[in-house]
Image: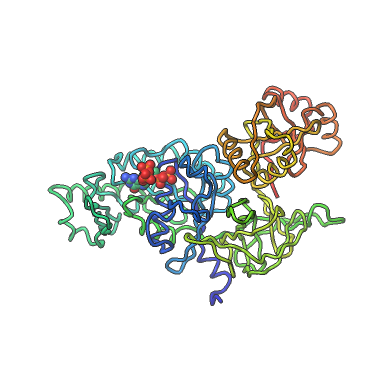
């Protein structure tokens, strides 16, 4: 039993995600953060691909084959009196929708840059998502053990391309073969870097930090003076770190290191513990399930992390994580309350109640039953399709969090199963994947086709792979006549007026919401003009 009060428990949570352009070192950094946090004992555990590795950073066969991470997961560890929840986000751009949803569950992001490359296209995209959601960002500049760009040039990129004020916390003493360590800006504290001895199996670790005045043995002629001069320039030239400005998304503290060489990682973890915000007060609504008769109008409320009622939302559903059990696990981010195993929670939009008897916490080496959890935590709730992405859950069943959007897909394809006898199975499988948010599924009002929508081509490949692997279905994707999908909103009469004229292009999504499948963007523009009372939207908020 926890001796801390509820608000104290919430206040010691740090729920964060790592964002990076592919290859910048997100996986390596994840692993070394877990190592520094004492969650794993040896490097290689996150990447270890044994039979039982499905609970770790990425789960799916396709990820192993392609070396990319497609499914977001969470890992929890306790360190230095704080509980850290690390959300893993897929780096590939075709999965930005999934990443977006995961970032709705994060309170802070670690932006990893490759020191030799600086800001890359995917860094920018992910950054924009963080900015949209007001998520504060800690920057980690990785791969200092290789030749890097000039540090000032890197900070200039952050300032000019992201409009963020960089506040260097440390400053590197060169890079690559000449990397000597890094100095803490304003304190004179120096952390030496030790190269790995060629051929050595064991990594000896880095020497203890010491004051720069006592660190001359770590430098060659002239280098120390150079570093002192650089440190002086940096101190005078950049603003000092301001916590409030960071929380408001104006400033980013800059840390440096080498994930691979476990350099700068303890400093990063400390920065997350000290500065990343605890779960914040969230906006929500108090609303009865939609079908309730004579329900009072929804009212806006705020949900305090330290409030007693358990509430939160599902930001991801993962199916078949364990090939031995065909389970479906909803990732539930808690916004408030003190959760106890066995508790009954209600889904706001359906009014359905479920007993959460086997909630899962994801520790790096294993999954364990969660006995209790607090705001900021993410628990996995096994279920058989009752829970969807975007669902709000609470004890009263009245709390509704909005803001988890579905994006209009950019590619629409028809899907067919090779063996016609398996058509029924296909529907079930497609529903399952759509509920997970892997792809979107549209059922045209006329005809028996299934139209699958995705933001990127790779999603179709993942889908085909999973349909084969998990459902034993061999499928074929074919071009569809449609170029765009738009959710249709308005009064029942207006929607019906529009639908009756475009019946052959009307479809339903998995929630039965009406969708217009346009043959071109020109057509979308045309119907928007012709039916001004109907809204044609690119996103649909779930929940
Ligand atoms: P990602 O998840 O962001 O895509 O990056 P990942 O960690 O997989 O790292 C991409 C490559 O960069 C890997 O090399 C990894 O070892 C390397 N790397 C990560 N951090 C550092 C670092 O601090 N210094 C150096 N020198 N390299 C780093 P790879 O050869 O593609 O893969 P692997 O064979 O090493 O696994």
In this picture, residue 72 sits left or right of residue 229: right
Where's residue 461, x and y in %? 57, 36
Relative to the observer, which residue lies in front, 501 or 30?
30
Relative to the observer, which residue lies in front, 272 or 501?
501
Where's residue 483, x and y in %? 66, 27
Q: Image quadrant of ligand 1?
A: top left
Q: From where the camera sits, is residue 457 visible?
A: yes
In this picture, residue 195 sits left or right of residue 537: left
How is the structure coloured here?
rainbow
Where's residue 88, x and y in %? 50, 51
Residue 99 figure quarter: top right
Identify whether 32 is placed above or below 539.
below
Identify whether 335 is placed above or below 137.
below
In this picture, residue 377 sits left or right of residue 82: right
| Residue drawn at (27%, 41%) of the image | 147
In this picture, residue 316 sits left or right of residue 186: right
Residue at the far left: name it: 221
Relative to the observer, which residue lies in front, 389 or 59?
59
Q: Quadrant of the N terminus?
A: bottom right
Identify whether 35 is placed above or below 63.
below
Q: From where the camera sits, is residue 257 visible?
A: no
| Residue drawn at (52%, 37%) of the image | 93
| Residue drawn at (53%, 60%) of the image | 362
| Residue drawn at (43%, 53%) of the image | 48
Where's residue 505, x and y in %? 77, 28
Residue 355 figure quarter: bottom right
Relative to the observer, which residue lies in front, 199 or 73?
199
Identify whether 124 is placed above or below 309.
above
């Amino acid at each position: 039993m926890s001796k801390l009060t509820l608000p104290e428990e919430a206040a010691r949570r740090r729920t964060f995600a790592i964002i990076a352009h592919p290859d910048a070192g997100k996986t390596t950094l994840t692993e070394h953060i877990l190592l520094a946090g004492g969650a794993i004992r040896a490097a290689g555990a996150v990447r270890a691909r044994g039979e039982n590795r499905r609970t770790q950073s990425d789960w799916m066969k396709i990820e192993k084959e392609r070396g990319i991470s497609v499914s977001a997961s969470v890992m929890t560890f306790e360190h230095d009196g704080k509980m850290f929840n690390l959300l893993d986000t897929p780096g590939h751009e075709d999965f930005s929708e999934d990443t977006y949803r995961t970032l709705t569950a994060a309170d802070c992001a670690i932006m990893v840059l490759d020191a030799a490359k600086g800001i890359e296209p995917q860094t920018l995209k992910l950054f924009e998502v963080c900015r949209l959601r007001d998520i504060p960002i800690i920057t980690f500049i990785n791969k200092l053990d290789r030749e890097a760009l000039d540090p000032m040039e890197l900070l200039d990129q952050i300032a000019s391309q992201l409009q963020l004020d960089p506040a260097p916390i440390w400053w590197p003493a060169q890079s690559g073969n000449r990397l000597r360590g890094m100095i803490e800006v304003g304190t004179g504290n120096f952390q030496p870097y030790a190269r790995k001895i060629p051929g050595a199996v064991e990594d000896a670790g880095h020497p203890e930090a010491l004051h720069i005045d006592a660190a001359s043995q770590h430098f060659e002629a002239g280098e120390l003076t150079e570093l002192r001069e650089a440190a002086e320039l940096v101190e005078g030239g950049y603003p000092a770190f301001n916590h409030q400005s960071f929380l408001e998304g104006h400033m980013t503290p800059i840390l440096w290191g080498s994930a691979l060489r476990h350099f700068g990682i303890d400093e990063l973890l400390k920065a997350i513990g000290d500065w990343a915000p605890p779960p914040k007060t969230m906006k929500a609504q108090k609303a009865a399930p939609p079908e309730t008769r004579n329900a009072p109008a929804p009212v806006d409320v705020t949900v305090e992390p330290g409030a007693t009622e358990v509430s939160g939302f599902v930001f991801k559903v993962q199916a078949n994580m364990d090939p031995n059990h065909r389970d479906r696990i909803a990732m539930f981010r808690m916004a408030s309350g003190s959760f106890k195993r066995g508790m009954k929670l209600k889904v706001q939009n359906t009014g359905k109640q479920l007993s959460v008897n086997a909630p899962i916490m994801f520790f790096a080496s294993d999954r364990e039953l969660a006995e209790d959890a607090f705001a900021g935590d993410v628990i996995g709730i096994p279920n058989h399709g009752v829970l969807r992405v975007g669902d709000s859950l609470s004890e009263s069943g009245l709390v509704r969090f909005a803001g988890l959007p579905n994006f209009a897909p950019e590619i629409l394809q028809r899907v067919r199963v090779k063996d016609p006898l398996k058509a029924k199975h296909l529907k079930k499988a497609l529903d399952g994947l759509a509920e997970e948010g892997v792809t979107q599924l549209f059922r045209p009002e006329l005809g028996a086709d299934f139209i699958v929508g995705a933001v990127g081509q790779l999603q179709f490949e993942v889908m085909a792979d999973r349909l084969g692997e998990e459902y034993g279905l061999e499928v074929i994707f074919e071009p569809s006549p449609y170029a765009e999908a738009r959710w249709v909103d308005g009064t029942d009469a207006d929607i019906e007026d529009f639908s009756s004229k475009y019946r052959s292009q009307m479809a339903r999504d998995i929630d039965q919401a009406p969708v217009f499948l346009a043959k071109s963007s020109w057509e979308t523009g045309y119907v928007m003009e012709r039916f001004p009372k109907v809204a044609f939207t690119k996103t649909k908020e779930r929940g």
